[in-house]
Image (cartoon, coloured by chain):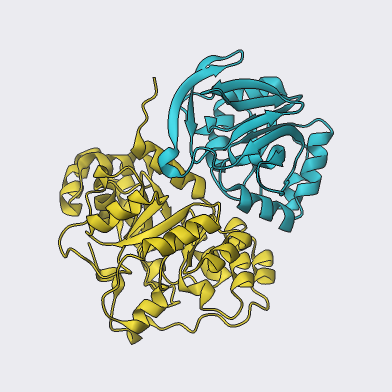
């Protein structure tokens, strides 16, 4: 008899999102534009990361009423963010039957040491990671999906690339290790041995891994897919651009046919203005440094 | 035997692995030129039906695929794939491929907290494991034969060489349904 294992079901929902684009939306209208453009899920939040960055101050979970408005507007899965370590916000999101919780460094952290014990929840969690150690620590806490942290709200892809490359190179290193060396590697990364063994044997994370943080163009999305991402989150990149619907459609198609440069060239034409963007050395707040 | 797997979005790799386990060949369909070759059957995987329906149209795949199925090619749709095959979607005017005489209800078990696993009888196979992820079910059939029900709701149906499932056989350990599909076509 197969058990009703919530964690397995939650990992499996992430599998269904693969090859898709998850878009940040702040209103039911934006959510509908995203769904019509081919988003496989939407992330409901009051302010997109670029505006959070501009506004400064403490950034918190969105108003549940606003999230429910978005849930009512679309038929695709709806995700929402809670602060790192803020398990009460996560309980509230679970109470309104959110499809996925993003315990996110985009919001102000509520706990400077601990992440949420996600194993206590029935709803799934996605967490950001800069490297393999962070990813496996989040998985050990109960995350059923991982995304690169990148640097949210910048429109700058450099950090997402760095995080994905670091993860890939650490995975390759562990794959080539002698089994005896894995115990020490587990100690260095501060993660349980069985997760390191899984990576050694399978050459991948035990959960789905998306790219996030700085994706602004179809080319950015194709770059991350070719680097091994299984799908893409686009935050500020769509609704901070000149023609959101057209850009969203182009990014969706770019994620499906990420290896076809000729098609990518067509998709990249006439998209209007991309979000302005800030370079990493021009910003004072590195969100990716929140929560390790 | 060579099976094309629609690879626009969703859990297509899982299906490819199961087909390989059964000893058949497989390839991915992402663009129109991918289906301009000879093959024996088609799989429409799980994922989001709105995404796949949209990409099927934009990439001009929907008409040729509909024609292949109408001319007798075997097809298996799982979860979102079942929605693509249905001639009616409940409370929705959208029709995607629409070759199968079934009416389906999307997100019929609610949100992710309503996702579940169970074991249930499947015609000719006996009891098999089934995983439902934000799943639809079959509300009624006009031509198709029902192969399995869970809690009195139809979750699998067949019409000629078309097989539609509300659950995800690609997530199970054994490729029982994939073998069934290969034998069926």
Image quadrant where residue B167 sits: top right
Position in image of residue A48 (x %, y %): 42, 73
Of the 4 image quadrants, the one containing the C terminus of chain B is top right
Tell me the residue at 58%/83% (across/down).
A273
- The answer to whether B76 appears left or right of A80 in the picture is right
On screen, A215 above or below A200? below
Residue pushed farthest front?
A65
Tell me the residue at 58%/24% (across/down).
B177
Chain shown cyan: that is: B
On screen, B82 above or below A29? above
Tell me the residue at 22%/49% (across/down).
A117
Image quadrant where residue A178 sits: top left
For the question of whether residue A58 can be seen, the reply is: yes
Chain A color in figure: yellow
Position in image of residue A78 (x %, y %): 46, 55
Q: Nearer the viewer, residue A83 or B23?
A: A83
Image quadrant where residue B163 sits: top right
Position in image of residue B97 (x %, y %): 74, 43
Of the 4 image quadrants, the one containing the N terminus of chain B is top right
């Amino acid at each position: 008899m197969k058990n009703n294992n919530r964690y397995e079901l939650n990992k499996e929902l992430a599998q269904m999102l693969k090859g898709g684009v998850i878009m940040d939306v702040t209103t039911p209208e934006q959510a509908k534009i995203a769904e019509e453009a081919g988003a496989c899920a939407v992330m409901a939040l009051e302010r997109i990361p670029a505006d959070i960055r501009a506004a400064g101050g403490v950034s918190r979970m969105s108003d549940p009423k606003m999230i429910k408005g978005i849930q009512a507007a679309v038929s695709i899965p709806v995700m929402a963010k809670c602060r790192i370590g803020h398990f009460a916000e996560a309980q509230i999101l679970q109470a309104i039957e959110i499809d996925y919780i993003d315990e996110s460094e985009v919001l102000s952290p509520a706990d400077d040491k601990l992440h949420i014990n996600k194993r206590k929840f029935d709803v799934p969690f996605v967490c950001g990671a800069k490297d393999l150690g962070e990813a496996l620590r989040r998985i050990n806490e109960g995350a059923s999906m991982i995304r690169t942290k990148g640097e949210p709200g910048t429109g700058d892809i450099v950090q997402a690339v760095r995080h994905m490359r670091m993860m890939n190179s650490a995975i390759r290193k562990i794959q080539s290790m002698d089994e005896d060396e894995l115990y020490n590697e587990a100690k260095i990364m501060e993660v349980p041995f069985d997760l390191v063994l899984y990576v050694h044997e399978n050459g991948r994370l035990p959960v789905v891994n998306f790219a996030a943080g700085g994706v602004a163009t179809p080319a950015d999305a194709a770059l991350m897919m070719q680097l091994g991402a299984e799908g893409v989150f686009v935050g500020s990149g769509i609704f901070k651009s000149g023609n959101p619907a057209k850009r969203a459609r182009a990014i969706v198609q770019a994620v499906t046919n990420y290896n076809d440069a000729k098609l990518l060239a067509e998709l990249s034409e006439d998209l209007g203005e991309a979000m302005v963007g800030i370079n990493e050395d021009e910003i004072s707040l590195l969100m990716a440094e929140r929560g390790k | 035997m060579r099976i094309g797997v629609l690879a626009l979005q969703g859990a297509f790799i899982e299906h490819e692995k199961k087909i390989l386990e059964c000893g058949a060949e497989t390839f991915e369909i992402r663009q129109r030129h991918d289906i301009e070759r000879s093959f024996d059957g088609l799989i429409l995987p799980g994922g989001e039906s709105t995404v796949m329906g949209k990409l099927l149209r934009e990439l001009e795949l929907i008409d040729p695929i509909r024609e292949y199925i109408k001319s007798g090619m075997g097809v298996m749709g799982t979860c979102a794939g079942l929605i693509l095959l249905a001639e009616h979607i409940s409370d929705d005017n959208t029709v995607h491929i629409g070759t199968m005489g079934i009416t389906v209800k999307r997100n019929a078990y609610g949100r992710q907290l309503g996702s579940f696993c169970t074991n249930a009888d499947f015609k000719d196979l006996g009891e098999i494991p089934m995983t439902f992820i934000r799943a639809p079910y079959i509300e009624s059939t006009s031509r198709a034969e029902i192969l399995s029900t869970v809690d009195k709701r139809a979750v699998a149906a067949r019409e000629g060489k078309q097989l539609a499932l509300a659950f995800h056989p690609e997530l199970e350990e054994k490729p029982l349904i994939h073998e069934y599909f290969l034998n069926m076509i």
